[in-house]
Amino acid sequence: MSTHEAVLPSIEACESFFRGALGLPLVFGMTWGDNHHPALTPAEDAKRASLTSPRLDDWLRARVALKTVLFSLGEDTDTSTIRFPNPRFSLSHCGRAAVAV
């Protein structure tokens, strides 16, 4: 690992820390790196088709993180109708990492 690569904590460590600190039942989804190809619904695929790299890469990583949260909550993993800012979900990406809560 180069000195410029971040070491990210596990999803479990993040959930445990923030649940304890905030007293809220938070669920995290995290992803990093390249080559993220989540299964997309037709509506998500239409959005994907409108994006170009590097924005496309960020968007795909964000979909993986957000779908992880939705799946963990037992909800439909179609992200096409979720808009941000959102009262239930938060999504952030930077570099080659994305986090959803």
Image (cartoon, rainbow, N blue to C red):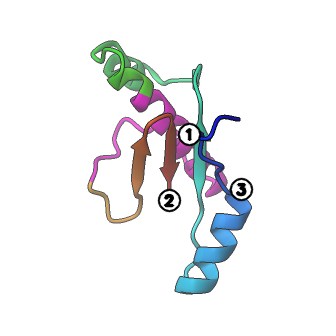
User: Are the residues at dot 3 and dot 1 in contact (C-beta closer than 8 Å)?
Assistant: no
Label 3 sits on residue: 10
Type of the residue with mark 1: His
Q: Position of residue 8 (x, y in %)?
A: 64, 51
Magenta residue span: 58-84
Q: CA distance from mark 2 to mark 3?
A: 14 Å
Type of the residue with mark 2: Val
Q: Secondary structure at mark 3?
A: loop
Q: Position of residue 7 (x, y in %)?
A: 66, 49
Question: Within the image, what quadrant is residue 1 found in?
Answer: top right
**Residue under the point 73% across and 62% down:** 12
Q: Nearer the viewer, residue 57 or 69?
A: 57
The label shown at residue 18 is none
- In the displayed structure, would residue 10 be above or below residue 5? below
Q: Position of residue 68 (x, y in %)?
A: 61, 45
Label 1 sits on residue: 4
- Label 1 crowd bin: few (<14), some (14–19), many (20+), radius 10 Å: few
Q: Is residue 19 magenta?
A: no
- Quick one: label 2 or label 3, which is nearer the N terminus? 3
Label 2 sits on residue: 101
Which callout, 2 or 1, points to the residue nearer the camera?
1
